Each structure stands twice: as structure tokens, then as C-alpha cells.
Image (spheres, rainbow, N blue to C red):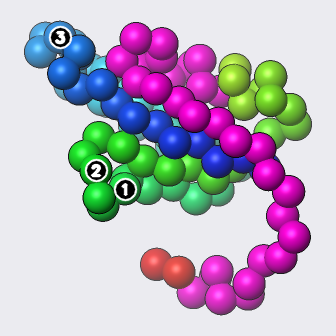
Amino acid sequence: MFTMDVVIKNHLIPDDKRDELFEKHAQWIQENYDSGAFLLMGPYTTKEMTGLIIGQADSKVAIEAITQADAFYPDYADYVINEFNINKINPKIAEIK
């Protein structure tokens, strides 16, 4: 399992590429959600252009490969990946909306 903090460097994205890159980024998120690699994700409410992804992959190399497929990689976003082991899952997680 892993967490990934994504910080988009919006100030570095050329205006003429912004919409295209955001569309590709959204597709990247959806593809990884559909494949089961991304389990939970969403933007932080305390800081613009940032978000958290919780997911699963076979290895750190696999996580990095997923990251490198994002349209913002490597120049327009920072990615902080942390691997973790699950000790407990509260059944109430199914109630989160």
C-alpha cells in the first residue's frame, strides 16, 4: 500500500498547455482508479492544487512507474510516495462519501 501526496506546480504550467495537461491528469487518475491501483483519492481542502492518493502496487518501482505516467511528471508536479502496511481497516470506511 502507498500514500502519494501530489502538489501541482500550477505557476510553472504554460497557459497554452494547462487545459490539456489537466485533462490528461484526470484521465491518469481515472485509469489508475479503474485498474485498482488508486483506491481513495481527493484534493486537500487546506491547500490548492494538492491532493492525496491511497493505493496499492506490487513494489516501489511499480508506484514510481505509475507516477511517471502522469502528464504533470516530472516538471509540473511533486510526488511524495510513502509505503505502509495496513494493520486495521475500520468497517465504517464503506460509509465514507
Q: Compared with residue 95, is residue 61 higher up or lower down, i.e. above or below?
A: above
Is residue 74 left or right of 11 when viewed as pictured? right
Residue 5 at x, y percent in the picture = 52, 42
- Residue 11 - label: none
Query: Disc 3 to disc 2, how far (Cα)?
Result: 21 Å
- Horizontal arrangement in the rendering, residue 80 relative to residue 35 (left or right): left
Instruction: Tell me the element at label 2.
Output: loop
Question: Dot 3 lies on which element?
Answer: loop
Name the residue carrying label 2: 47
User: Badge 2, how many Cα within 10 Å: few under 14, some, many 20+?
Assistant: few
Instruction: Let me know if residue 47 is in the magenta part.
Output: no
Report which quarter residue 16 is drawn in: top left
* Residue 50 sits above or below residue 86 on the image: above
For label 1, the crowd category at 10 Å Cα-Cα, with few meaning under 14, some 14 to 19 and many 20 or more, is: some
Question: Dot 3 corresponds to which residue?
Answer: 14
Residue at the (79%, 51%) spot, across then down: 84
Q: Residue type at mark 2? A: Lys
Q: Position of residue 90 (x, y in %)?
A: 74, 84
